[in-house]
Image (cartoon, helix red, strand yellow):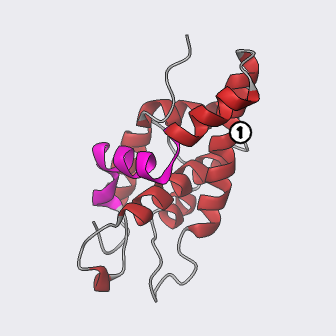
């Protein structure tokens, strides 16, 4: 957990994601959990990220001629809040989230999952809505398997 933005923190997160941001402000916003200093936090990015994650999984299912039920089950298992929080922590992203000091340095599971969604949303926006960039980051984080 960090309390302020820095270029070192930005680079560390880009290394984890395997994606270099053109507009680093998108990355920085995605790392900001709600606090009095950041009243909107990263929730708007997370909404976009949630939709981009669903699009990536459903498009993958479409490409493989999977049933809607199968695609939805995979999405629900691989992109649940618990799964995203676990993957965020295992990739070390929790060390880079900017949280409210009142949280005593603890990144909750909900905040971690929302941060992962926000980062995916930031990638989607920064890449010009390139779902392949999103899929690559999802593979790097372990949310999605490498294409066969």
Give the percent coordinates (x, y) of residue 120: 56, 48
Quadrant occupied by the C terminus: top right
User: Left of 68 or right of it: where is 26?
Assistant: left
Give the percent coordinates (x, y) of residue 82: 42, 51
The front one of 16 and 57 is 57
Above/below status of 97 relative to 92 = below
Q: Is residue 95 magenta?
A: yes
Residue drawn at the location 63% of the way across and 52% of the way down = 50
Segment tinted magenta in the rendering: 78-96
The front one of 56 and 125 is 56
User: Left of 144 or right of it: where is 141?
Assistant: left
Residue 76 placement: quadrant: top right
Disc 1 target residue: 55
Q: Is residue 81 magenta?
A: yes
Give the percent coordinates (x, y) of residue 105: 24, 73
Give the percent coordinates (x, y) of residue 93: 34, 52
């Amino acid at each position: 957990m960090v309390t302020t933005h820095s270029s070192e923190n930005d680079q560390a997160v880009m290394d984890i994601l395997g994606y270099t941001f053109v507009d680093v402000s998108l990355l920085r916003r995605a790392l900001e959990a709600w606090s009095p200093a950041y009243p909107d936090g990263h929730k708007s990015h997370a909404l976009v990220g949630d939709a981009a994650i669903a699009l990536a999984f459903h498009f993958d299912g479409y490409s493989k001629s999977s049933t809607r039920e199968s695609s939805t089950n995979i999405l629900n298992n691989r992109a649940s809040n618990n799964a995203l929080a676990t993957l965020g922590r295992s990739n070390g992203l929790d060390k880079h989230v900017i949280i409210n000091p009142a949280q005593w340095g603890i990144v909750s599971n909900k905040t971690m999952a929302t941060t992962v969604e926000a980062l995916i949303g930031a990638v989607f926006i920064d890449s010009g809505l390139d779902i392949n960039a999103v899929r690559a980051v999802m593979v790097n984080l372990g949310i999605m398997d490498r294409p066969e």
